[in-house]
Image (cartoon, helix red, strand yellow):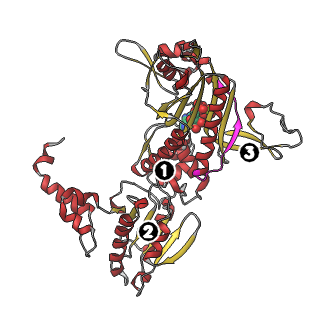
Amino acid sequence: MEPAVHKSWRRVFHNLHRAFIIPKRNSSGWADHAAASPHSSHVKSTLLVSRLYQPSNLRDMGLDSQVAGEMSCKSQRLMQQAGLIHPSNPGCYYYLPTAVRSMEKLIRVIDQEMQGIGGQKLDMPSLCSADLWKASERWDLMGKELFRLKDRHGTDYCLGPTHEEAVTTLVAHQATLSYRQLPLLLYQITRKFRDEPKPKFGLLRGREFYMKDMYSFDVSEEAAHQTYESVCQAYTRLFARLGLRCVQVQADTGNIGGTLSHEFQLPADIGEDRLLVCGNCSFSANVETLSSDKTDCPRCSTGSLVESKGIEVGHTFYLGKKYSHVFEATFSSAQNKLTTAEMGCYGLGVTRILAAAIEVMSTEEEIRWPGLIAPYQVCVLPPKKGSKVDEASVLAEELVQTLGEALPCLRGEVVLDDRTQMSIGKRLKDACRLGYPYIVVVGQGALEETPKFEVICQQTGETMFLSKDGVLDLLGKVETL
Ligand code: ATP
Ligand code: MG
């Protein structure tokens, strides 16, 4: 820490205070907190758009050369323009604060669903020993996709693209695992590294990305299939909660191995996977799993298969004993016999889901979020400085304060667009593009005898004129995590 911070702490605090806190203008409760102690006043601060680190470039709709150089798509363009991500090197991005807020919410929903079916969260090293990957024979099989490196002793490592080897070794080291502890579901949400031949489409195909990977250990094939089914159901619930239409398709098992596998696909034109969906029954499959000329449904045989494109957001595999056999992940059975565990593995592309949601929900110009994971729920727009209705700006600040205090669901979710040198129209356009689920415009109506606020609900496209109580009623129902 820099010494200057200690020396001039008082001055630094004073400046911080000025920067983050709107000066007292009324007698509402928050001013008392401000007086109590520097820290409590800091906590009570209003989120100001002018202070958010979101270097957006919304008015420049052209692509900068770096983006144009890569193959680009709508979500990548919108995310860069809105200051959600910033490119660093091919397939690698800075996730800026607003995107991180959204991602943390997405992670909370994933945690809820995984823990809802008994998943326990852990965190494994990204630096993986080559020995493990040689034991499973994937050191060679993975080819150039594996990021390989050597330590100072010349020992080989890779940066984990997935963690079957690591987790199975971990479980194998626990000598006392009993059948009573199974099914065991372990998962993590960490960065994964893959030297993709063509990183593209922003977060949709990166070389460094976040994945949720879960691994299951069961007593028998039957039990493993039940676990597999419950994970698929959890994935279906997850996408339903996000308001995303997702299809579960039969899939190829790739180099992960195993015999049963499904992909979770979001239908989208830029999707890189080709899907065949039966118009008659619920059959759907990745083209890779069927012979290329197939047009009749292999399940109901009456329906014909229609092709569409999809973005793979999740993948489930039944692995059997492939890894547990190699690494000797065993448990003691009810008959007290050492038995090899049956395994499954289940991936969700966390950063890919974020981008894919934006890809399928947004218009060309305006981001739309799944409400649950929008970075901020509400943006309040006070009038332009010096305009006829300037005095309503006090009401805007009061409203922000009241929302944060009266509605626990909106704590930390309301921002005030204090760039009052700009017209309401310009700021409204920005707010629409950034996709806040609710925008509250404080203008002429707020100065009427019973103040009225204009509330734009972006999800439904509705505009409402509501009293302060009406705004509280409406926003009190917002679901947040
Ligand atoms: P793809 O076919 O798209 O290359 P994969 O089948 O190799 O993906 P899995 O090994 O099944 O991917 O990984 C689990 C999940 O991780 C995928 O369903 C996807 O959502 C996500 N994912 C995989 N590769 C990437 C990547 N390069 N960038 C972002 N997310 C990815
Ligand atoms: Mg896959």
Q: Secondary structure at mark 2?
A: helix
In the figure, 78 relative to 168: above or below? below
First reached walking from the N terminus: tag 3 or tag 2: 3
First reached walking from the N terminus: tag 1 or tag 3: 1
Query: What residue type is disc 3 on?
Result: Ser
Query: What residue type is disc 2 on?
Result: Arg
Q: Residue at x 46, y 16 (%)?
A: 173
Q: Secondary structure at mark 1?
A: loop
x, y percent for residue 69: 53, 43
In the figure, 122 relative to 77: above or below? above
Residue pointed to by mark 1: 64
- Choose between 412 and 128: the one closer to the eye: 412
Q: Secondary structure at mark 3?
A: strand
Residue pointed to by mark 3: 308
Q: Verify whether residue 243 appears in magenta.
A: yes
Q: How many angstroms separate mark 1 from mark 3 (CA)?
A: 31 Å
- Choose between 270 and 182: the one closer to the eye: 182
Q: Residues within 10 Å of mark 3 (few under 14, many from 20)?
A: some
x, y percent for residue 375: 45, 54
Specify start and end residues of the magenta stretch as a single range: 241-254
